[in-house]
Amino acid sequence: MNNSFKKSLARRPTRIGRGSLVFSLWSFVFALQSFLTLTTSYAQSPTHEVPVNSGEQVIIEDNVLSLPNSLQETSPPTPPAGEVMPSGYTIFDDQILLTNYAVKYSELSKEIILAMMKDDTLGSYKNAAAIKVFREKFSHEVVSREKRIVEKILLRRLNRTDSPFVEVEIMHTLCVLDRYKYFKSMAPALIQKLDHYNATVSTLAFESLNNLIKLGNDRPREARIVFHTLRKILFLSRRRLATIDKPGPKLAQKLQVLRWSIKVLGTQELKRLPKEVLNLM
C-alpha cells in the first residue's frame, strides 16, 4: 500500500508539468494570432494620421509615409540663369581664408613669422599668409646674412610645396628680396600662373606681377623678360585667339602686362607679335 502511494506521488509532477506546457503553447498561439490580426487590419486601412508637436500631421497613405513640409529635407535653391550661387552655399573661399589668416598674423613678430615659414606641418593657407605678412612687413628689414637665411627658407619651401598659393607668394617675395637675382626665373613662372584654373591663384599672380612692375622703375631688362614670355605663350595659342572677339579675364590680364612691356621697350616690338594678338590689343 505504501509503495503504490509513493509511485502515484512520483507520477503527479510529470502530469502537471505536461499540462502547463500545453497551456503555455496554446496561450502563445492565441497571442500570435491576435497580433497578426491587428497588424493586418492596420496595414489595410487607407489613411492614418499621427499628430506631431508642430501641429502638422504625418500621413501614412497606401503604406507610404508622407512627412509634413516642415520635416521634409529641402535642397539649396537653384540660382537663376546667369547668376552665381551666394557665398553662403560654398564650402570655403580661398581668398577669404588667405586674407583672414594674413590679418591675424599681421600682429605677430618677425621671429614667429619666420618659424611659421619653416614649419613643414603648417597648412598651405597659413603658410601662404605667413609669407605674405613677412613680405609686406619685414622683407625690407632683412639684410646681409639674415637675408640669405630667409632666401634659403623660401627656396626650400618652394621645392617642397605643392600649393599654388604658397608658390605665388614665395615667387613674389623672392623678387622683392633680390629683384635682380630672381626676376628672370620667377616672373615667367608668375606669368604661367595667370592660366591657373583656380581664380584666386590667377588673381594672386596678376597682383604680384603688377606689384613688381610698379616697384621696378620700368627696367628694360625686366620688360624684355616679360615680353618674351608672353610672346611665346600667345604665339602657341594664336589659333584659339583668332576665334576670340573680346578677351576674357585671364587673357585681358596677359594683354595688360604685355602692353606695359611694349611701352617700356618701344612700339617696334609689335611687329614681333602674331596678328591674332594685334587684333586684341
Image: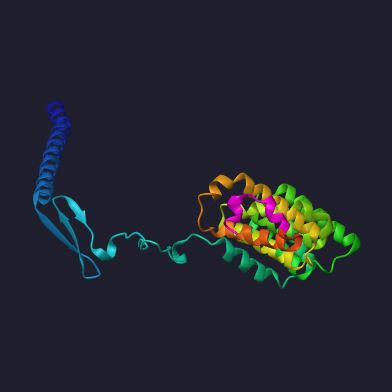
Q: Quadrant of residue 278?
A: bottom right
Instruction: Residue at the far bottom: name it.
Output: 107
Identify which residue, 133 or 2, lies in the foreground.
133
Whether residue 19 is visible to the viewer of this picture, yes or no, is yes
Left or right: residue 17 versus residue 53 is: left
Q: Is residue 19 above or below residue 281?
A: above
Instruction: Residue at the far right: name it.
Output: 144
* Image spot of residue 70 (x, y percent): 27, 66
Q: Main secondary structure of the magenta part?
A: helix
Whether residue 120 is visible to the viewer of this picture, yes or no, is no
- Residue at 90% over, 60% down: 145
* Image spot of residue 205 (x, y percent): 66, 59
* Image spot of residue 156 (x, y percent): 77, 50
Q: Quadrant of the N terminus?
A: top left
Query: Residue 278: within the magenta?
Result: yes
Identify which residue, 270 or 150, lies in the foreground.
270
- Residue at 16% over, 36% down: 21
Q: Quadrant of residue 133?
A: bottom right
State the colouring used for the structure image: rainbow
Q: Quadrant of the C terminus?
A: bottom right
* Image spot of residue 190 (x, y percent): 69, 55
Left or right: residue 46 versus residue 271 is: left
Identify which residue, 47 or 185, lies in the foreground.
185
Number of labels in the image equals 0
Query: Residue 73: within the magenta?
Result: no
Magenta span:
268-281
Q: Quadrant of residue 255?
A: bottom right
Identify which residue, 74 or 269, lies in the foreground.
269
Left or right: residue 253 versus residue 136 is: left
- Residue at 62% over, 44% down: 236
